[in-house]
Amino acid sequence: MRTLAFFLSTLLLAQAPIETMDGTDPTRDGLNLTEPIRVTENIWVAIGFGNTYLVKTSAGNVIIDTSLPNHAQRHVKMLKAVAPGPIRYIVLTHGHGDHTGGVALWKEPGTRVVAQKNFVEFQHYQARLAGFFGLRNRAQFGAGIGDRAAISGASRGNYPANIVATDLFDDRFEFEVGGVKFEVHATPGETYDHATVWIPAWKAAFPGDNIYGSFPNIYTLRGTQPRWALDYVNSLNKILSWKPELMLPSHGRPVAGWANIQTAATRYRDAILHVHDATVQGMNDGKDVYTLMREVKLPKELDLGEGYGTLAWSVRGIYEGYAGWFDGNPSTMFATPPAAIYPGLVRMAGGASAVAGAAQKLLGENKLLEALHLADAALTAEPGNRIALEVRLSAFQQMLKQSRNSNERGWLNFGIQETRRKMAQP
Ligand SMILES: [Zn+2]
């Protein structure tokens, strides 16, 4: 059995830019790297929108996550060049496309593909809504990323996914390759099929997407089922209980040393718990979701940065995850939305141009969100109103200039494109 001291001595720090988690967008970091990073004697990572890890053993290799289809080819080439050998296992930390995209490229006859059992329903859920997610992903991530082949308005049925996993487990799965024991643990968080790989001999944990260098996306704007905050907390506690010396997340860079990992994972857990508990407290106090989106903040020592997820979206994700869509106002429980009376209101206010002019004034006062809402009202009355479209475009452009959040930037860019498209119409 290799000792921890041996393991630490094999950490190839010179070649591995090991970083602490710094709040920048973890999905964009390192995409330009043309070489994999050798983390230890036997572990390599190809960084991408979804990292691919390769663990080398004397009896073949184990792959942990496989990135997006358009990154996977590069990852396979890079990793096979430095660590050739048969692929004995592929472990998928969860069923998102940026983790499963390269399975077909790695899989050989006899390769086992391991996933948590909820992977099956998660795959069907994503395939069931392929048209919806195709459009949402294209908007959020820009046209270059996302499975465009999946975009289709036609329903493919309720259970249409092709399940690539060969070995499904409930709570825990173990296997051994070349004398190295791998444990795979159910760790729900970002998804309900989420798993963490643990190599006890090397004290190495692969937590997938349950921790990265930003406050998590407890709700993602492209649409998601509830991501339960307390699942993240429990799963991070499970990982902390192992006292890892190496943490190898599926976005961003590896983190080395128990002290660093303990600090990072504890802060991450406590930040999620803080936001969860503050939201629950606010709900019990009778506060509405928008109030809590504005009010819930993290103390400075728990500020993880909001390069990817944000507190406000997460607060709403937690609130509506627990309560669903109804806001408690009996006026809103029917199929007629508040916007149905906008055209009448706009008429009373002097017409679409008058309202758009008022929106323009708000824009000048830097009240961008109020300007957007007012422009939207004008546009319900007159969809092609030039001034309202200009207000919308300008507000999105100004917000984009200030935004440091990649998902927010994706949707602002989408708004800009959509508005320009409408402005180009005769
Ligand atoms: Zn991911």
Image (cartoon, rainbow, N blue to C red):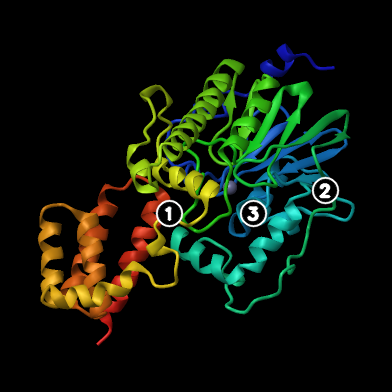
| Residue 328 numbered mark, or none | 1
| Residue 72 numbered mark, or none | 3
Report, in whole angstroms, how far the alpha carbon at label 2 lies from the one at label 3.
Answer: 23 Å
From the image, which quarter does the C terminus lie in? bottom left
Residue 356 image point, x, y percent:
15, 70
> Image quadrant of residue 294?
top left
Residue 128 image point, x, y percent:
66, 68
Report, in whole angstroms, how far the alpha carbon at label 1 lies from the one at label 3.
Answer: 47 Å
* Local SS, label 3: helix
* Local SS, label 1: loop
Q: N-terminal of the two: label 2 or label 3? A: 3
Going by the image, does 347 lie left or right of 412?
left
Residue 150 image point, x, y percent:
61, 70
Residue 259 image point, x, y percent:
57, 15
Q: N-terminal of the two: label 2 or label 1? A: 2
Label 2 or label 1, whichever lies nearer to me, is 1
**Residue drawn at x 48%, y 57% as measured from the top left:** 325
Q: Give amino acid for label 1.
A: Gly
**Residue drawn at x 47%, y 57% as measured from the top left:** 326
For label 2, the residue is 168
> Image quadrant of residue 22?
top left
Cβ of mark 2 under 8 Å from ligand 1: the answer is no
Instruction: Please tell me whether residue 141 is drawn above or below residue 52 in the rendered image.
Output: below
* Local SS, label 2: strand
Going by the image, does 285 lie left or right of 250?
left
Cβ of mark 3 under 8 Å from ligand 1: the answer is no
**Decide: marks 1, 3 in contact (CB < 8 A)?**
no
Q: N-terminal of the two: label 1 or label 3? A: 3
Cβ of mark 1 under 8 Å from ligand 1: the answer is no
> Image quadrant of residue 54?
top right
Report, in whole angstroms, how far the alpha carbon at label 2 lies from the one at label 1.
Answer: 41 Å
**Residue drawn at x 53%, y 36% as measured from the top left:** 212
